[in-house]
């Protein structure tokens, strides 16, 4: 599986499950309607877990342009690979958003709240203040990226010729899932914690394309793109300085 395909599939699953849980909580008549913020943050964390499991062995499962840019900034990824990663992340995010719309099409039709329907695609501020909203995205993404740099593999070493395999296998995706869960629970209440430019921009584009009524809120759309990029660069530079 190529980097492009891996990032498409991994990000698609992330957005399908992440925006899917928002739709389940927000849209009218669903089984999970009004089940709350903890359900949403848990769904997003598990979406990360699933996406990382699929894409991890082939691309490292960035699933997020902020992760890609941070790794390149820290010298852990060639800048020549950045366009392929980001293309996969954007395509995957758009496909995931489309599948959410297909899955909840009847509920989108029966829901009158246009803001709630937009929330099933992208983020928005609880209190609209460009400076504060930007700062929230910078801080949330900084935490995500800085901690990712310190998520290490197994420390047990054995003889190379023993034939034994030691590691977490697919469970190695759990630390990142817990990290995203923690960010959502602790820092997500201000802007909905995009912390991922593709996660917000790709689905927002799909909201504009699909027959879903309501504003796309393009006036806010730059914040969940620029904020995470700033946050990821700060995290990468601090990590490099410390290490």
Image: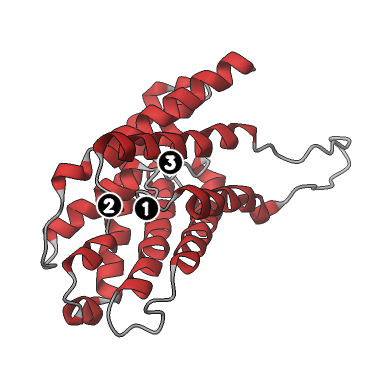
Distance of mark 1 from mark 3, alpha carbons? 28 Å
The way the protein has been coloured in the rendering is secondary structure
> x and y percent of residue 112 in the render?
16, 76
| Disc 2 residue crowd, few under 14, some 14–19, many 20+, Cα 10 Å | many
> x and y percent of residue 237 in the render?
50, 19
Residue at 55% across / 32% down in the picture? 146
Examine the image and state in which quarter residue 85 appears.
top left
Q: Which residue is mark 2?
A: 124
Q: Is residue 165 left or right of residue 172?
A: right
Residue at 29% across / 49% down in the picture? 200
Q: Which residue is mark 1?
A: 192
Q: Secondary structure at mark 3?
A: helix
Residue 21 sits above or below residue 12 on the image: below
Q: Secondary structure at mark 1?
A: loop
Examine the image and state in which quarter residue 82 appears.
top left
Q: How many marks?
A: 3
- For marks 3 and 2, the one nearer the N-term is 3
The C terminus is located in which quarter? top right
> x and y percent of residue 42 in the render?
52, 63
Distance of mark 2 from mark 1, alpha carbons? 6 Å
Q: Secondary structure at mark 2?
A: loop
> x and y percent of residue 65 in the render?
38, 37
Of badges 3 and 2, nearer the viewer stands 2
Task: Check if mark 2's residue and mark 1's residue have beta carbons within 8 Å.
Answer: yes
Q: Is residue 202 left or right of residue 53?
A: left
Q: Is residue 196 left or right of residue 104?
A: right
Of badges 1 and 3, nearer the viewer stands 1
Q: Which residue is mark 3?
A: 3
Residue 169 at least partly seen? yes
């Amino acid at each position: 599986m190529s980097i492009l395909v891996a990032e498409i599939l991994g990000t698609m699953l992330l957005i399908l499950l992440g925006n899917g849980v928002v739709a389940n909580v927000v849209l009218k008549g669903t089984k999970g309607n009004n089940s709350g913020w903890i359900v949403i943050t848990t769904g997003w964390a598990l979406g990360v877990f699933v996406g990382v499991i699929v894409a991890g062995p082939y691309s490292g499962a960035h699933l997020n342009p902020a992760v890609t840019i941070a790794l390149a900034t820290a010298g852990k990824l060639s800048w020549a690979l950045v366009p392929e990663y980001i293309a996969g992340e954007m395509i995957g995010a758009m496909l995931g958003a489309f599948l959410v719309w297909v899955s909840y099409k009847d509920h989108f039709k029966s829901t009158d709240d246009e803001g709630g329907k937009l929330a099933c695609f992208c983020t928005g501020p609880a209190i609209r203040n460009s400076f504060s909203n930007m700062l929230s995205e910078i801080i949330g993404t900084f935490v995500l990226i800085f901690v990712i740099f310190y998520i290490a593999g197994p420390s047990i070493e054995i003889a190379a010729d023993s034939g034994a395999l030691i590691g977490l296998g697919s469970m190695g995706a759990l630390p990142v899932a817990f990290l995203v869960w923690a960010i959502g629970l602790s820092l997500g209440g201000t802007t909905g914690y995009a912390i991922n430019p593709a996660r917000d921009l790709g689905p927002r584009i799909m909201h504009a394309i699909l027959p879903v009524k309501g504003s796309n809120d393009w006036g806010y759309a730059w914040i969940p793109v620029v904020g995470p990029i700033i946050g990821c660069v700060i995290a990468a530079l601090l990590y490099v300085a410390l290490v």
